[in-house]
Image (cartoon, rainbow, N blue to C red):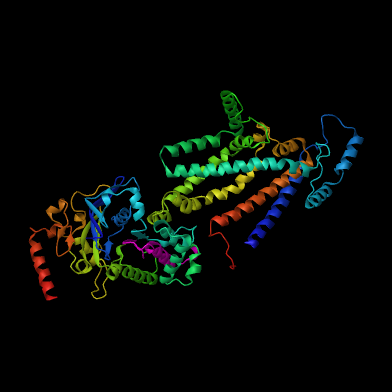
Amino acid sequence: MSLLKLRSLQVSIGPVKAVRDVSLSLEAGECRALVGESGCGKSVTAMTLLGLMPNAAKISAEEWWFAGRDMTQIKEREWRQLQGNQIAMIFQNPMTALDPTQTIGAQIAEPLRIHKGLSRREAKMRAIALLERLAIANPAQRAEQYPFEFSGGMLQRAMIAMAVVCEPELLIADEPTTALDVTVQAEVLSLLQEMRESSGTAMLFITHDLGVVAEIADSVSVMYAGQTVESGSLHDVFSREAHPYTQALKRAVPSLENPKPLEAIAGTPPDLRQPPSGCGFAARCSKRMAICEESPPLMSCGEDHLARCWLWHKDHPERWREAEAVSLLGGKL
Amino acid sequence: MLSFIARRLLSGVITIWFIATATFFAMHAVPGDPLTQEKAMSPAVRAQLEARYGLDKPLFEQYRLFMSNMLHGDFGISFTQENRRVNDIISKHFPISATLGIAAVLIALVGGVAAGSVAAYCRNRWPDRLVMVAVIAAISVPGFVIAGLAQLVIVAMNNAAGKTLLPVAGWGSVSQIWVPALVLGLGTMAYLSRIMRASMLEVLSADYNIAAKAKGVHGWRLFWHHQLRNAVLPVVTELGPTIAAITTGGFVVELIFAIPGLGRYFVQAVQQLDYTVIMGTTVFYGAFLVLVVVLVDISYGLIDPRIRLHRGRA
């Protein structure tokens, strides 16, 4: 059974339908990347999964399971036991996500004090041990320092420590490397990978950096205008991209092996206050058809590979040809 | 930290010197002197009195004498209250003003922080609106009106109860502190709650607040550990001038509630041109203000680690 199963999540904040139809699933220990451009609903999805949306937000889902619990029925109290304990989050900007008035050690120890009932002393010892594992020199001394005394890379490590200290089953990383230098990025990524492998934590890695995705993810979900438009294994989504949006994204990323002019995607994403009734990408799509006026469901285009595009409908003539090509290719490989 | 305090104290000394000098010459520039009274005084008596108080000396000589005495901690003898030393007036009446002032500051601080936090938590809902309306009222209605109203309310309460629940005025018991202190601190409380509301709103939308919730921190723990300490900083900044203003500005409230504080001597001295009392109280209030500001700066460092200067660091 999946650790997380989410079918057709919808979140609206006032007039904005920030998340219109997101379906995700994660197995224990899996790392799934959630990619998409700014404003497509990635972060709202993350906040919703962590129960951090304000009360004013309207949230509904056809199905939402986490660790055997029906999350559509969950109470505020139960949320508090999950947060920081079974689900934890690494935030985008470590410079602002740590409390400036508390020591690093106290902030890392806090989840242990709340969820595991450890004494101040024990919790602090665990925090120091964790800082040491995260390759911070003089961890005991560092734990007594405040965020303003840490560099960006060290702050991000402190934040990772804060998130993994209770060994959560699901770790949500919301663009954990975008605020960092490229050299520090690589370091943080390998640390995350290490922590994940040693504790078997599943990870939802939110990013718009496809290079990072290729490095860390097992599987990928692509979001566009509040919907998951494609999901599959890393290999499926990167080499056999099925949705025209994913295909366009790939043409917009420079490649060393095959250098050619980059193609920007013409147009802009739809206004989520008045989302289109049909396919969200239709207005920018080069393969637009008459049926794109209607909203497409997720359709299968391979084993565990889904795309929200009419091109993959069973009655579409090209579907047949592509499916054949894929199987031929698969046969050759 | 020590050099920081030393520097602040040094600049405080310069400030006090400046206050003393400016007050001294401004006071002497006012027409008339302490000996000018409705009843005419014979020139001989006047000359004798002038000699006794040193008023016959040139102004700069008087200034030099005053400064030298002040450095020895002596403000001289009052002109209008016979043979009463200014030091005695201050040491007898300032503690009363200070007690009232500290009570007022505490009420203003606790009330302001609480009201501001409630308003921020309930942004744009009725508790917020209620607090904001009360704030405008408390800021715009003058203290003497509120003092009078407060006395009316006490009288009505006592009448209704048929016994004295709260004394209307006077000084000497704990029950006589709270009403004047509340009246004195009300304007400040309103002002502080506005600042608190704004800074709490900022904290509530800060990343670290969301991150703390993501760790499972909720309720009072979230408030005490993460929100209050960050949100209270701008309030603490205001505290220095506020404490000074309340402890030295209680004159009207002291008068209405018949509290024998220093304020009344300060005002009387100015009206009667009682040179020594004017100088004494002004310099004393100035020194007090400087001290409070330094103390607040130190407390700021205790709350915000970024301002603290660290051990073994230049």
Q: Horizontal and vertical percent for residue A325?
A: 10, 69
Report the front residue among A278 and B185: B185
Whether residue B289 sits left or right of residue A137 in the image: it is right
Range of magenta residues: A148-177
Whether residue A29 sits left or right of residue B73 in the image: it is left
Report the front residue among A81 and A227: A81
Q: Tell me which corner region of the image, top left, top right, bottom left or bottom right, holds residue B309.
A: bottom right
Q: Horizontal and vertical percent for residue B238?
A: 57, 48
| Farthest right residue in view | B44
Quadrant occupied by the N terminus of chain A: bottom left
| x 34%, y 46%: residue | A55
Quadrant occupied by the C terminus of chain A: bottom left
Whether residue B242 sits left or right of residue A328 in the image: it is right
Q: Tell me which corner region of the image, top left, top right, bottom left or bottom right, holds residue B258.
A: top right
Q: Is residue B145 magenta?
A: no
| x 90%, y 39%: residue | B48
Whether residue B114 sits left or right of residue A308 in the image: it is right
| x 42%, y 37%: residue | B126
Q: Tell me which corner region of the image, top left, top right, bottom left or bottom right, holds residue B89.
A: top right
Observer able to see residue A53: no
| x 12%, y 69%: residue | A326
B81 lies above or below A236: above
Report the front residue among B160 and A239: B160
Count every numbered label the image shows and give the total. Answer: 0
Report the front residue among A249 and B131: B131
